[in-house]
Image: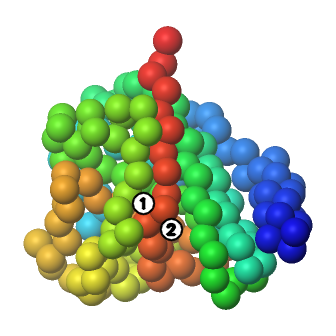
Amino acid sequence: MLFRAMLISLFSFIACLSPAFADSDAQDDKAAIAAFMESDVAKKFHNSAYGYAVFPTIGKGGFGIGGAHGKGRVYRGGKKTGDVSMTQVSIGLQAGGQAYRQVVYFQDKRAFDEFTSGEFEFGAQAEAIAITASAGASAGTEGTSASANESQSETNYHKGMIVFTMGKGGLMYQAALGGQKYNYEASK
């Protein structure tokens, strides 16, 4: 019963955040990408990627049980191919709320097709590279740590994908992606 009450409270909290984080048009996508382009590391991937998914705002909150949700779009060749939503549920010591941006770059058609197959989930060991607005945050993939200003050769795709996050109104040094589920719907 307590678990159910906490779950209802969590989703009520996230629902209250949703209107404040409802960035969902092309201008918001462009602003999010422009913020990531301040990092030479992210810029390298943006300029060479087969495609990408951008989430202008993901709201994250919790009290014991946490959750995150955001909506974004997927692009290939500069054109929108569809809409995507991300949902994450976590259990553990946590309290509060946060908002952040996220971009997922696809190295090739295989990775793009895997992500846009309908439903996609990152494995438990997947991590994101955190970028601050000044592009100087620590960064890591699969536990490897490198400064966002260090050699770009130290930061590589993992299974054809790489994820960058950027806190909005705060810092987010590392984001665990395990448990993040993505639902893709192609444009009509």
Q: Is residue 143 left or right of residue 5?
A: left
Q: Residues within 10 Å of mark 1 (few under 14, many from 20)?
A: many
Q: Is residue 69 left or right of residue 51?
A: right
Quarter residue 45 falls in: bottom left
Note whether 19 is above or below 176 in the view shown.
Answer: above
Q: Nearer the viewer, mark 1 or mark 2?
A: 2
How many numbered marks have been drawn onto this rendered protein structure? 2
Q: Residue at x 79, y 57 (%)?
A: 11
Quarter residue 129 falls in: bottom left
Whether residue 131 appears in this view of the structure is: no
State the quadrant of the N terminus.
bottom right
Residue 3 in the image: x percent, y percent?
80, 71
Three-letter code for the amino acid on which mark 1 is drawn:
Phe
Q: Nearer the viewer, residue 110 or 92?
A: 92
Quarter residue 12 falls in: bottom right
Note whether 145 is above or below 114 in the view shown.
Answer: below
Q: Are marks 1 and 2 in contact (CB under 8 Å)?
A: yes
Whether residue 115 appears in this view of the structure is: yes
Note whether 185 is above or below 148 in the view shown.
Answer: above
| Alpha carbon distance from label 1 to label 2 | 8 Å
Q: Nearer the viewer, residue 185 or 78?
A: 185
Label 1 belongs to which residue?
Answer: 36
Residue 153 in the image: x percent, y percent?
11, 72
Q: Residue furthest left?
A: 153
Label 2 belongs to which residue?
Answer: 166
- Judged from the image, the secondary structure of the residue bearing numbered disc 1 is helix
